Image (cartoon, helix red, strand yellow):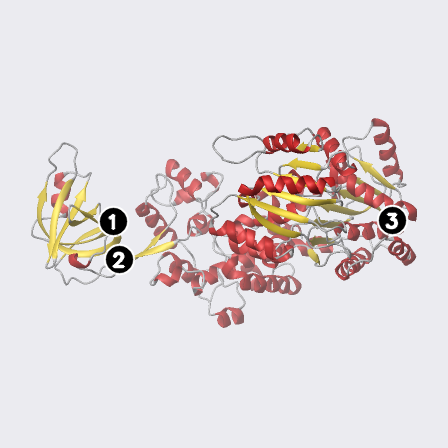
Amino acid sequence: MTAVFDIGPLIAPVNRLQGVGPARAERLAHLLSRESAAETRVFDLLSHIPTTVIDRREMVSVADVVERTVATLTVKVLRHEKSRRPGGPARIIAADDTGELVIVYFRGGGAWRAAHYPIGEWVRVSGLVEMWDGRPQMVHPDQSARVEGPEAPADTQFGLEPVYPLTQGITPGVLAGLIGEALGRVPDLTEWLDPAFKSRAGLPDFTAALKTVHQPQEGRDILPASPARRRLAYDELLASQLALAVVRDRDRTKKGVARHWDKAIVERLEASLPFALTPSQRTAVAEVSADLASPHRMIRLVQGDVGSGKTMVALFGAAMAAGDGGQTAVMAPTDLVARQHYETLAALLEPQGIGVRLLTGRISDAERAATLAAVEDGSAKVVVGTHALFQSSVTFKDLALVVVDEQHRFGVHQRLALSEKGPRSDLLVMTATPIPRTLVLAQFGDMDVSRLTDKPAGRQPVETRAVSISQIDAVMDRLAAALARGEKAYWVCPLVEDNPALEVESATARHRTLTKRLGPVVGLIHGRTPTAERDNVMAEFRDGALQVLTATTVVEVGVDVPDATIMVIEHAERFGLSQLHQLRGRVGRGSRPSTCLLLYKGPLGEIARQRLDTMRATNDGFRIAEDDLKLRGEGELLGTRQSGAPSFKFADLDHHADLLAIASDDARLVVNRDRDLTSERGRALRVLLALFERRRAIERLRAG
């Protein structure tokens, strides 16, 4: 059999289909979430799968119809009735042996109705049946056809009809016609799946799977568990994982620098720590050590819950790099977080003779000039900063390691810009957002992953309680008593300012209330607070001049005030599960017992109740992430497009997580055996990458 690799008919513009002019192409682009009609492909249309089906196969009698359901009936036309008022509906009275059905049209001329519903003839109609004036009626039937009699055989027109998401100007009939034409253009492509796996998993051919999902013979054919849907989901997941594997392979084989250092440096550093490393920290440090000693570039994600000690992993990486004369750049999302990292790293590394500098937009010109000089001559072994590190004026003597804190706050181009300052530098990315294992594969499959699953000794779990907002006065009384004992607290609100449309207290209004109740010990920060003012307020809170910080979610990530012991989250029902957990992570960072109060306004919806129940039940961020995935689904959880997270059309990780793991293994095996994808299966897999637009991988293959 001749190999077929031509996907031209599938990647052709959708306007090549009959009946798709400029206006309809634009509507299709909107429906299929494409930027423009020009980039909307035939395969995009075929990737738009039905959400449910309408079964028109079962015939019912007039007497047996159920109100507000879709029914298919065969009836004889008795008469036509015109409306008594101009522009009113026309009625066609038809009947079977059990009763009369009224067929109603608000448009269409009398000649059209007479031709389609001749008096004395039998017709078959299907549509929504409602009761009107004591009789069943069907307004504008979805399907209608003349038949020979009540026993006329079933017609494909009255079969299983897929139901798709639509947009204005694209009717179900138009979409069905276009998809039917598109299906006719699908070539029998050379198989890209491993034959043994395909047989074992009971998966159909690619073309057959597409046809089954769009022209189902049974309702279960469109379900995630059906063989056709699993086939298409696996194709999509394999394309994603293969793309990541190709990129990973090309990045790994880029020559790095095998670093060598005196182990005594690391031993002295560990001995100087005021605490013992956790088992998972030790594992992560060992993994980073092995990567730095390898001649290949490190690309590693350190994934840890709030308070799990990710910064310590970066600390040891920086010490190892410095031990070989190399420099480390630590990139933080905000000036405040950069300063926190600087203080932590300087306190531990400077005594070991490793120079640490801070480079942000807020240091003085003199400090900046001195830091730039120290970076350029190599005496600054560790530089901590924000986006200021990207600037062309920053020149490293030997950038060995790039550490990026909070992956989701930086775009890919920013990380690359920093890496270009040390083309052979290793990359360590830290994220405090626990990510379910399936999403780690989907989103970070091109990285090695270290997971920090335990917390440093002395950290205590945060006691979490859900409290009705009607008890807010009692909460304020308890807060006043805690402040009298010298404790500190956060009070988080969902809005910056009052919104009359929402019955929610804003951070600004709550700050006024708390100040009146507690005195001038209450500060306020939110997303509109100028950076300098925000940092000053945070410094006052950290140093003790303020005891309560009223805020929005700007305190969600990176803020470290170890002696803060109380977190109040107002209208907790409005926050997502992961966000609640991140906010709770701002307390419990010291050795004192801490509390998180979730103030909610009832009645609670089911999902909001489940969120609060989960928060009370566990402090484990990884378990919370898994529960969040179940509640919200992977699309919403992956969220921001700039993260590089894939958006799947056929795959649903709630149902296809097993396929993702298999695809990941298959992709790595393929790249190990056929790095350039030149075998017959490799060439077929190139087609798969092109079909699912994994351009980055294709570019890497072309570049060798």
Which residue lies under the disc numbered 3?
Answer: 322
Mark 3–mark 2 Cα distance, whole angstroms, equals 72 Å
In the rendered view, does 417 fall on the left or right side of 679?
A: right
Q: Is the C-beta separation of discs 1 and 2 under 8 Å?
A: yes
Specify the amino acid type for callout 1. Answer: Asp
Q: Residue at x 78, y 41 (%)?
A: 340
State which tag comes first along the sequence, 3 or 2. 2
Secondary structure under the numbered disc 3 in the rendered image: helix
Residue 56 bears which disc, if any?
A: 2
Tag 1 residue: 142
Regarding mark 2 in the picture, which secondary structure is present there?
A: loop
Tag 3 near tag 2, CB within 8 Å: no
Q: Earlier in the sequence, mark 1 or mark 2?
A: 2
| 172 w.r.t. 234: above or below | above
Instruction: Choose between 211 and 583: the one closer to the eye.
Output: 583
Q: Picture coordinates of residue 474 (x, y %)? A: 60, 42
**Quarter holding residue 666:** bottom right
- Say left or right for 413 vs 362: left
Q: Is residue 324 visible?
A: no
